[in-house]
Image (spheres, rainbow, N blue to C red):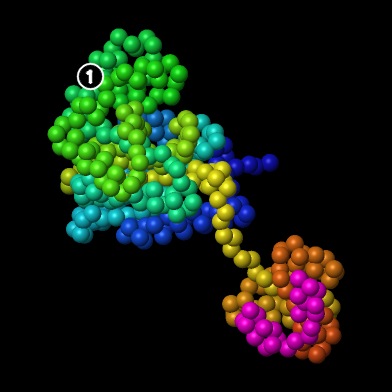
Amino acid sequence: MYRTPRGTVDILPQDQALWHFVKEKAAAVCRLYGYERIDTPVFEDARLFVRGIGEGTDIVEKEMYTFEDRSKDPLTLRPEGTAPVCRAYIEHGMANLPQPVRLYYIAPIFRYERPQAGRFRQHWQFGAEAIGDASPLLDAEVIDMAIAFYSSLGLRDLVLKINSIGCPNCRPEYLNRLKAYYADKLDRLCPDCKRRAERNPLRLLDCKNEMCIPLTEKAPRSTDHLCGECARHFQSLESHLRLLNHPFEVEHRLVRGLDYYTKTVFEIQPPGAQGAQSTVGGGGRYDNLIEALGGKPTPAIGFATGIERVILNLQRAGVEIPRPGKPGVFIAFFGEGTETKAMEYAARLRREGIGVITASPGRSLKAQLRQANALGAGHVLIIGEDELRDGLVMLKEMADGQQRRLAPGEVITYFKQR
Ligand code: HAM
């Protein structure tokens, strides 16, 4: 028996309405804020992600699906959406367009993670990137858009956490302080953090291990060590968020798992959330990424949200979603020559925009009506030998069982009027 690979799921027909609903809301909010859709390949040059996300990160160290193709080129299944969008921005000369360039994507993402509730090896992200503007107004816009997306779905009371992790001017000094703080505490850290202490000390702050959490409390805070520009940027963002009426918490342990961030970072969590996989969306500023990937220095900010986690939260909140209609007409037939007549009528109705499902040949009329009922068809057209002879069809209303014989043209008029 073959099964879905570990950490992946099928999105079955009964789940599609919910998925469609979420993707439509994403597209609608992007239209409101002027973000245009971009689709990039599922795989990219592996070096794009190593350079973009950072060598010391969990994603690059442990989670990428990297392989050589038959030409021995190293390729990686997209483990996140920001680096590919920046690659496209540079490759297609988008720096020549009016800035910022606002883009969004809805795409599958691949990470070799330990699967658990809300954490998959293939998941989908809706992400948005605003490239080419350094103003904190844009940080506020992206956060506002993320919240607008969630509330358009009916998800409210989410918790917004923000932080600033500084820039290449102020961060080295902060990292030194962080290392100094941890220097005499290394033996109290989990094995992962012992490794991180040297290579990626920022990540010590968001370790979820019981051993490490108490130590993060008293650790130096990045917001206390920002340079003048980063501090002003953060203050402006805070005041914009107040103006937009978005309550937020400044979380000094929020550092995010990708190395490209500068200044603003943020995450959005459901109320009462615990653990890393409860975060429904996150993002931040990445003012140096485009340059690191070979473009001109270009500030940018973005966010992404996991669609599976959005859906999980919708289900938990009991949000009702509209179900799209199925074809309302079923064509049943029995007797010599009726099969092709059924096909002919079905084609005619569909050309008029009326959805039709036809029965499968060789079944009794009773079985066909049972199938129509199971499919939820409101009307059944029955073609027997009598109808075939008279050039008519029998219309049966499933609600009250009433039947009458009509000419094909009358059937079309009847459905069009409904
Ligand atoms: P991220 O926080 O790694 O950020 O992922 C964004 C969102 O994707 C998470 O908040 C979560 O909802 C979802 N997610 C991540 N990993 C998984 C998983 N294994 N299973 C299910 N859902 C998952 C980024 O990827 C950045 N590119 C976001 C960004 C855009 N920053 C700036 N622009």
Q: Secondary structure at mark 1?
A: helix
Q: Quadrant of residue 413?
A: bottom right
Q: Could you tell me if residue 71 is visible in this image?
A: no
Q: Is residue 365 magenta?
A: no
Q: Which residue is label 1 attached to?
A: 177
Residue that appears at 48% across and 34% down: 272
* Picture layout, residue 148 above or below residue 182: below
Front one among 278 and 7:
278
- Give the image location of residue 286, x and y in percent: 26, 41
Q: Quadrant of residue 238?
A: top left
Q: Is residue 400 magenta?
A: yes
What amino acid is labelled 1 in the image? Answer: Arg
Q: Quadrant of the N terminus?
A: top right
Residue that appears at 56% across and 43% down: 316
- Give the image location of residue 411, x and y in percent: 69, 84
Residue that appears at 35% across and 41% down: 247
**The magenta stretch spans which residues?**
395-418
Q: Quadrant of the C terminus?
A: bottom right
- Give the image location of residue 172, x and y in percent: 20, 26
Residue that appears at 55% across and 36% down: 117
* Picture layout, residue 367 above or below residue 171: below
Asked if ligand 1 lies within 8 A of label 1, the reply is no
Please, which residue is most extreme toward the left here?
A: 228
